[in-house]
Amino acid sequence: MRTLVAVVFIALQALAAAALFLLSIHGPSALIYGAPVYLVAAATLTWWASRRSWLLLAIAGVALLGAAPLTFYALERIERIADQRRIAGTQISEVRDEPILLAGQPVGIRVSYRVVTTRRGYFGILPWIHGVGRGEGFGLSPRRWSFDGSTGIGFGPFEPGRRHDVVVDLYPETYHSEEDNKPCFRRVVRPLPPVGEPVPLRMEISDSPYGSVEHGGREERTHGAYDMATLLGNVAAAGVPPCKVQP
């Protein structure tokens, strides 16, 4: 009878291990290895306890099932600390920006910079530009980039201690892409900011301290001056066709 109960506990532990493995897709990557280790350890200890007594089996079975969520939270915490250290150690230098012109009109901003990281991997070390003053609440997001001279959807891998050259094209929300990555103009349903004087815009580079007080940096601005309302409106003025699907 104890053998049957032990088998039931081990089956439940296998389900918990499978759940941990699936959570590695969007959770701690170490769960890929932690899930099978948990299953082997839990099953071994449960079987050992079943050979000793009912009391040991009950304690081991329940405790080891409870160890599954603890494994998740422990690995998540470890990974979060490691990410915070990596972000704090990421070095950004030689940041430059310039307008992207289309039909002679500025429709976006090109940002180039150099990155040195402390770990190998694929990280989202990408710039984001935010409006200031009356343009606050609007911004430009990365749409295209090159990594060490290579263009495409790949962004990495970063090698520890190596300097990587990154160039990113950022566009306002009126600039959209449809089939075959062809640009199109997309309406903005909320009121646009009034046209004003060009000013330096607030910029941060994610997964780094650059422009992020939260990650130990300071507020940063673009070197050039831009007007958010003009960038938003110039996408249509430059002759970009309207998107087939509008908000």
Image (cartoon, grey):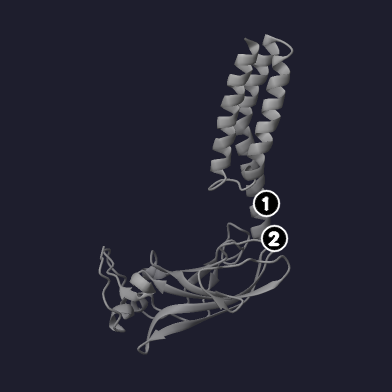
Q: Can you say which quadrant of the picture contains the C terminus?
A: bottom left
Give the labeled residue for mark 1. 82
- Furthest-bottom residue in view? 104
**Residue beneath the point at 31% across and 77% down:** 233
Disc number for residue 243: none
Q: Is residue 220 visible?
A: yes
Sequence-wise first label, 2 or 1: 1
**In front here: 106 or 6?**
6
Give 179 or 160, whichever is nearer the viewer. 179
Q: Nearer the viewer, mark 2 or mark 1?
A: 2
**Residues at badges 2 and 1 in contact (C-beta under 8 Å)?**
yes
Q: Residue 209 location in percent, x, y?
A: 61, 63
Q: Quadrant of residue 191?
A: bottom left
Callout 2 amino acid: Arg
Local secondary structure at mark 1: helix
Q: Quadrant of residue 71?
A: top right
Is 129 positioned to the left or the right of 44 in the image? left
Instruction: Using the image as rendered, state which of residue 152 and residue 96 is in the foreground.
Output: 152
How many numbered tags mark residues here?
2
Q: Which residue is mark 2?
A: 119
Residue 159 versus residue 115: which sits nearer the camera?
159
Spot occupied by residue 4 in the image (x, y as percentages of width and height): 61, 15
Q: Is residue 61 above or below residue 186?
A: above
At x 63%, y 48%, the residue is 80
Label 2 sits on a secondary structure element that is loop
The quadrant of the image that shows the N terminus is top right
Please indicate whether residue 195 sits to the left or right of residue 198 in the image. Answer: left
Name the image quarter holding residue 68: top right
Question: What amino acid type should be assigned to the residue bearing mark 1?
Answer: Ala
Label 2 crowd (10 A; few <14 / some 14-19 / many >=20):
many
